[in-house]
Amino acid sequence: MHLISSNNMSSARFVLLSLCSALLLQATHGADPLFHFCSTPENFTADSPYESNLNKLTGFLYAKTSSSGFGLGSIGQYQDQVYGLTLCRGDASPTDCKACMADAGAEIRRCCPRNKGAIIWYDKCMFKYLDADFFGQIDNANKFYMWNLNNVSDPKAFNSKVRGLLTGLFEEAYTVPKMFATGEVGLEGKTKLYGSVQCTRDLSSTECKECLEGAIGELPSCCDGKEGGRVIGGSCNFRYEIYPFVNV
Ligand SMILES: *[C@@H]1O[C@H](CO)[C@@H](O)[C@H](O)[C@H]1NC(C)=O
Ligand SMILES: *[C@@H]1O[C@H](CO)[C@@H](O)[C@H](O)[C@H]1NC(C)=O
């Protein structure tokens, strides 16, 4: 479990505890990743069939995700088989999705150069690959939190609004093909609370429900009384903020 705090007071700059390397600072184009895990200790060797399959799969998933916002695929046989999954945020435009996938495909290799499995998240997309079939299984291993440093004045009332909004959203998300839902509710005065939830589309509707229930159950540990928060995993995520962050 990893924790990241973010201060969204004026600009959305994140305080990252773990950047993959100084190389990241040289990546001048595109957005920075939110987080990554190199999820297996095993390495592939340079110019091996595994590497070649991973390269092919990355290209395949890039093309697939650019049009549908989601990609799932596997290439190779036996010990050289690679499984991959890509997902763009449900509201990402095809252009944003494509740009994010290009960043993710390159950056995951910089962060985890030879690992047989890895996962990387951006604001607008995620990319995961592994040397074993993980499709349709809830990923409980790869997960992190982000939260706004600002505290709300009435945590009890606010937390209950957050839980209410996210619960309504997850009940919608697991019943729709995109497995993504967004919404808002009024707070005091002119303030509103905005939320989104999303599952990877390899999950069944039951698994999506289970995954989001689990994530929302982590609200007290992730973002108790915080103006904004996210639980981001390999199979589902939620986010809430007191400012609009979804493109409509
Ligand atoms: C994989 O490579 C890394 C970096 O070179 C090394 O630290 C690690 O021990 C290797 N893992 C295995 C299982 O050999
Ligand atoms: C929010 O509350 C925590 C815990 O009481 C405190 O440590 C932190 O400094 C507060 N944050 C801000 C921005 O005031």
Image: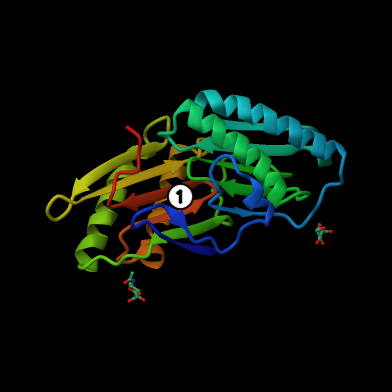
Task: Name which quarter of the figure residue 58 lies in.
Answer: top right
Q: Which percent across, then down, holds residue 24? A: 64, 51
Query: In this rendering, does residue 63 appear at all?
Result: yes
Q: Quadrant of the N terminus?
A: bottom right
Q: Which percent across, then down, holds residue 191? A: 19, 51
Residue drawn at (48%, 40%), measured in percent from left and top? Answer: 124
Which element type, helix, strand or loop, lies under badge 1? Answer: helix
Residue drawn at (61%, 32%), measured in percent from left and top? Answer: 72
Q: Quadrant of the C terminus?
A: top left
Q: Which percent across, then down, holds residue 51? A: 81, 39
Q: Residues within 10 Å of mark 1 (few under 14, many from 20)?
A: many
Task: Indicate the amino acid at tag 1.
Answer: Cys
Question: Which of the pair 145/32 is nearer the observer?
Answer: 32
Residue corresponding to mark 1: 211
Residue drawn at (63%, 30%), measured in percent from left and top? Answer: 61
In the image, taking residue 166 as reference, residue 238 lies left or right, namely: right
Question: Which of the pair 152/163 is nearer the observer?
Answer: 152
Query: In this rendering, does residue 69 appear at all?
Result: no
Residue drawn at (20%, 67%), measured in percent from left and top? Answer: 154
In the image, taking residue 80 as reference, residue 171 lies left or right, namely: left
Task: Name which quarter of the figure residue 170 lies in.
Answer: top left
